[in-house]
Image (cartoon, rainbow, N blue to C red):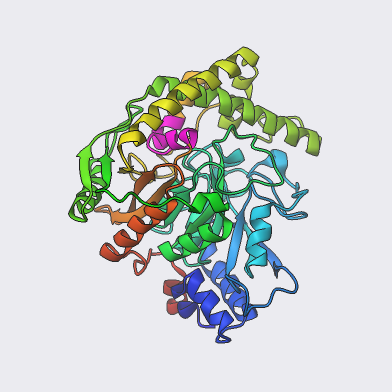
């Protein structure tokens, strides 16, 4: 299979070709593996490529929904028994999944082929991915810039044409931020719409599993496949939709006018399509939000590190944890049960403040990130001696527009609607009411038609590299 042809196909097109007998799963997998071998050295998205694709035996390609589609699994979150799950950390090196996640089982039963694992920031804590275990993950648009995080490997692999879709998860923008940095689509579904089985929700409801894609039809197909039935039942309003737009970072960090202009232009298009659009923002306390996020994430992180240390027999320390990871771990030691209960109260307060906005508005549009993707020199990665204030400030620097909706549970999608003067992608975030994914995807399709992005190719892309050989 020609690599230029392969890289031009999204998951839906691959499945149609395989189901129709024009391509075999083996041909597709071989092309994907060649694509990874060509493009990944310049990107650093794939941390493990399996000797052979993992599939579900007995699945008939003529019946499978996504027959033959290759994908990657992120190095944290959803697992498959026996497949590496190291959280991008030296502390977890060598660990494998003990159970099969329902998400991965569902993808394999749909005829998809799991080729390997993608990179994450350590324990998915940072929106910048450069670990001592696996090195940096770069956006294919400019190797000096980070692919974001924490689902950086997934977004970079899809953007560079290695795979059409890839698994990721989102606890504070971890699907949307790398999607913005890499010029692809990242949907964080509504809380509870994607099953976490067999695992319990240890992330206080903030963490969502889903996929990075290149086309809206792939996003819709995967959501239809993976979502619980009640998550697809909402119908859009019959009245004229009300949309708020906001480009001012809630945390007070500096925002880029170039990024804000793209979001503003997208809001104007919604008005041209019949929505009532006004500059409006949810009114909530960022300070209360940041305190709740810090406490809940810190205690969750300490639990994860302690469980990993028990599993590996290693002692957490500077030899096996990044400075920021260790700083959060140390900070969590000063948090008691009262701190956690107070954080849960603050989270409830902010969740209600955010919900009030969606009593009056059907959708909110914002930038995905306040600024363009970081260069590796600019990226804030934290220090070993960081305390709560420094940790909050670091988390706010890139997650100011995305993080609140992990708390609220609203669905949110990042679409690659613009490019900077230097050629870097700019993502715009659409946030909807709970269970409004059908409506969000409908608007996403309109944007895809009006501002098509699928034909854009970053400098590091399978088709470009293959053509030069």
The number of callouts visible is 0
Task: Indicate whether 150 appears above or below 80.
Answer: above
Is residue 10 found left or right of 240 in the rendered image?
right
| Residue displayed at 63% across by 25% down | 299
Q: Of residues 170 and 72, which is closer to you in this image? A: 170
Furthest residue toward top:
338
Residue 180 coordinates in the image, percent (x, y): 39, 50
Q: Is residue 278 visible?
A: yes
Q: Is residue 43 visible?
A: no
Furthest residue toward front:
238
Task: Indicate whether 355 appears above or below 452.
Answer: above
Residue 123 coordinates in the image, percent (x, y): 61, 39
Task: Indicate whether 469 appears above or below 109.
Answer: below
Residue 460 coordinates in the image, percent (x, y): 43, 64
Q: Main secondary structure of the magenta part?
A: helix
Residue 405 coordinates in the image, percent (x, y): 44, 37
Q: Of residues 91 and 364, which is closer to you in this image? A: 364
Q: Is 402 part of what is drawn in magenta?
A: yes
Furthest residue toward bottom:
22
| Residue displayed at 21% across by 43% down | 277
Q: Of residues 459 and 216, which is closer to you in this image? A: 216
| Residue displayed at 45% across by 52% down | 186
Q: Which residues are magenta?
A: 395-408
Q: Is 405 part of what is drawn in magenta?
A: yes
Task: Indicate whether 52 appears above or below 227.
Answer: below
Point out the image quarter for the N terminus.
Answer: bottom right
């Amino acid at each position: 299979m020609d690599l230029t042809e392969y890289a031009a196909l999204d998951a839906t097109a691959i499945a149609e070709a395989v189901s129709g007998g024009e391509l075999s799963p083996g041909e597709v997998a071989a092309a994907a593996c060649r694509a990874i071998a060509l493009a990944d050295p310049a990107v650093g998205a794939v941390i493990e490529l399996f000797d052979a694709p993992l599939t579900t035996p007995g699945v008939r390609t003529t019946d499978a929904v996504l027959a033959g589609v290759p994908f990657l699994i992120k190095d944290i979150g959803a697992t498959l028994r026996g497949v590496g799950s190291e959280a991008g950390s030296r502390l977890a090196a060598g660990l494998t999944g003990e159970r099969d996640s329902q998400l991965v089982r569902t993808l394999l039963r749909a005829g998809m082929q799991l080729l390997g694992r993608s990179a994450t920031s350590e324990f998915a804590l940072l929106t910048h991915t450069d670990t001592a275990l696996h090195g940096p993950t770069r956006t294919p648009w400019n190797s000096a810039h980070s692919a974001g995080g924490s689902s950086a490997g997934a977004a970079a692999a899809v953007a560079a044409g290695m795979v059409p879709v890839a698994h990721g998860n989102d606890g504070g923008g971890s699907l949307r931020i790398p999607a913005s940095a890499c010029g692809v689509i990242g949907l964080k579904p509504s809380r509870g719409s994607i099953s976490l089985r067999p695992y319990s929700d240890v992330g206080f409801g903030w963490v969502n599993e889903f996929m990075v894609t290149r086309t809206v039809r792939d996003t819709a197909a995967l959501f239809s496949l993976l979502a619980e039935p009640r998550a697809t039942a909402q119908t859009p309003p019959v009245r004229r939709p009300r949309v708020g737009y906001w480009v001012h970072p809630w945390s007070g960090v500096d925002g880029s006018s170039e990024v804000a202009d793209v979001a503003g232009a997208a809001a104007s298009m919604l008005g041209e399509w019949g929505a009532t659009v006004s500059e409006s923002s949810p009114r909530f306390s960022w300070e209360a939000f940041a305190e709740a996020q810090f406490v809940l994430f810190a205690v969750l992180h300490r639990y994860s590190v302690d469980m990993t240390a028990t599993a590996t027999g290693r002692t957490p320390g500077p030899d096996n944890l990044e400075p920021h990871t260790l700083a959060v771990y140390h900070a969590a030691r000063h948090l008691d049960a009262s701190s956690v209960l107070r954080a849960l109260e603050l989270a409830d307060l902010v969740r209600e403040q955010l919900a009030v906005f969606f009593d009056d508005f059907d959708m909110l549009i914002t930038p995905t990130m306040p600024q363009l993707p970081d260069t590796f020199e600019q990226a804030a990665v934290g220090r070993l001696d960081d305390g709560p204030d420094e940790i909050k400030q670091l988390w706010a620097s890139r997650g100011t527009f995305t993080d609140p909706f992990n708390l609220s549970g609203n669905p949110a999608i990042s679409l690659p609607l613009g490019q900077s003067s230097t050629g870097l992608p700019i993502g715009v975030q659409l946030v909807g009411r709970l269970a409004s994914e059908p409506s969000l995807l409908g608007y996403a399709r309109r944007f895809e038609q009006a501002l098509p992005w699928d034909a854009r190719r970053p400098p590091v892309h399978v088709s470009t590299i293959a053509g030069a050989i």
